[in-house]
Amino acid sequence: MNKMPGMLDADLRGKVCLVRMDHNVVKKGKIKDTMRIDATIPTLLHIFKQGGLPILMSHVGRPYDKTTGDITISEADAVEAIVKYLENKLQLTGIVPALTATSKEGISDIHPLQDSIDKLKAGKVDFVYLPNTRWFKGEEAKDEKADIFAKALASYADVYINDAFGSWQAHASTYAIVKYLPSYAGLLMQKEVDSLQAVFSPKRPLVGIVAGAKFDTKIGPLSSLIKIADHLILGGVIYNAYLCYKYGVQIEGVSAEDIAQAEKFIKDSGEHAAKIVELPFIIENKGIEYRDANSWKVQNIKDIPKGTKLGFVLDIAPQSFELEEISEIFTEAGSFFVNAVMGYTTLFPEGSMAMYRLIDNCDKAVKLFGGGDTIQDFKEYLPGVFARAQIDPKYYFFTGGGAILDAIQQGSAFGMKPIKALIEKQN
């Protein structure tokens, strides 16, 4: 039975609630956007309303070095900025336990956590916020270290709540922990999963728009998305790789491996490959560190001779979205799923802006946006449109782009490992 156990069915009164959230919004010690934090506040408030005692946790950044196995603990990846935001937003008092690492493997001794929990139970603080989960030994482990950490963590709580839709990877704090505590989905998790049905059972035609820096990280979900979408639009380096394969050109920054992956994707897609919508006008720039009047030009990929060596293709030119055949696809769409920044927006945001405006003008369509960069760029470059979109019922902004792509690859949100663990624990 594909039904998650929800926190509304849990008895939380007087219980220590270990809550996994996706507050991965800190960069260099500062919050870059509060959207993901704000989206989890209803879950936190419900815990307070039911008399629960919350211990919150989230990962921040990527402090684990996969090559050396070392974990770097730094203020740049700390949770203190999140705690301060929650304190100011909700007029509450939080505490971050003084846990320290004794080796490069990360924090292993969590016994000092008890002091913070005692203060929580005594009413001296309103919530506990653990240090960055990726600072802990075992959080990202693939062996028994994950279970050791999860079991130790569980010993300090009565209930586990997963409200971290965007944290879709099977780590100790999202997956292994379910073995050791009564476990439930948070309010945001339930909302995100329910909203995903608009992707799997869309109002048609469905236009999928996906961009990325590496084809190998997207080929799995793209292979699934192209089957359920009516049209597929690519952006970023994965589109550049597609152009290299399709038109036999060479584009700076596109590796032979990327091109091989693009070829595999097209051949494996078979007849579905015809769904790919080509955006012919591209922006070629001489570098990726500057933009000036003489460094870039607009080109039509269809006019470029095979074998031509191009510089960096850093954006889809807005002219592509002015073409009648492209605007017609957008105008007739019933749904959009957007996980895409069309270009290198630090220098060239115009392509993304043109696309977002075109989508916004499609009044009848459902518009589903996922991915931190996608939403952040939408908000930064078209703040007025974004402000209206937030109160438009035809828009929905997911808190995790990678999570949606994983769900698409699995064929269902219920195939995502952390969600699957909740369901299996209940059953």
Image (tube, grey):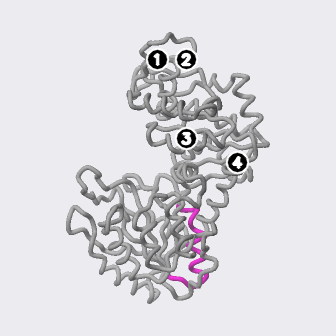
Say which residue appears at 46% left-offset and 55% top-offset.
Answer: 25
Disc 4 marks a residue whose amino acid type is Arg
Earlier sequence position, callout 4 versus callout 1: 1
Height in image: 308 above or below 85? above
Q: Which mark is residue 388?
A: 4
Q: Nearer the viewer, mark 4 or mark 3?
A: 3
Task: Determine the image quadrant of residue 358.
Answer: top right
| Quadrant showing the N terminus | bottom right
Per the image, label 3 sits on a secondary structure element best described as helix
Q: Where's residue 301, x and y in %?
A: 55, 17
**Nearest the eye: 2 or 154:** 2
Height in image: 268 above or below 5? above
Earlier sequence position, callout 3 versus callout 2: 3
Disc 3 marks a residue whose amino acid type is Leu
Q: Which residue is mark 2?
A: 301
Q: Which residue is mark 1?
A: 249
- Report how far apart the C-alphas of labels 2 and 4 lie in the structure: 35 Å
How many neighbours does mark 4 have within 10 angstroms: few (below 14), some (14-19), or many (20 or more)?
Answer: few
Say which residue appears at 43% left-offset and 72% top-offset.
Answer: 177
- Report how far apart the C-alphas of labels 4 and 1 lie in the structure: 41 Å
Disc 1 marks a residue whose amino acid type is Val
Earlier sequence position, callout 4 versus callout 3: 3
For residue 101, side relative to residue 129 (left or right) = left
- The magenta stretch spans which residues? 37-53
Q: Which residue is mark 3?
A: 222
Say which residue appears at 55% left-offset and 49% top-offset.
Answer: 409
How many neighbours does mark 2 have within 10 angstroms: few (below 14), some (14-19), or many (20 or more)?
Answer: some
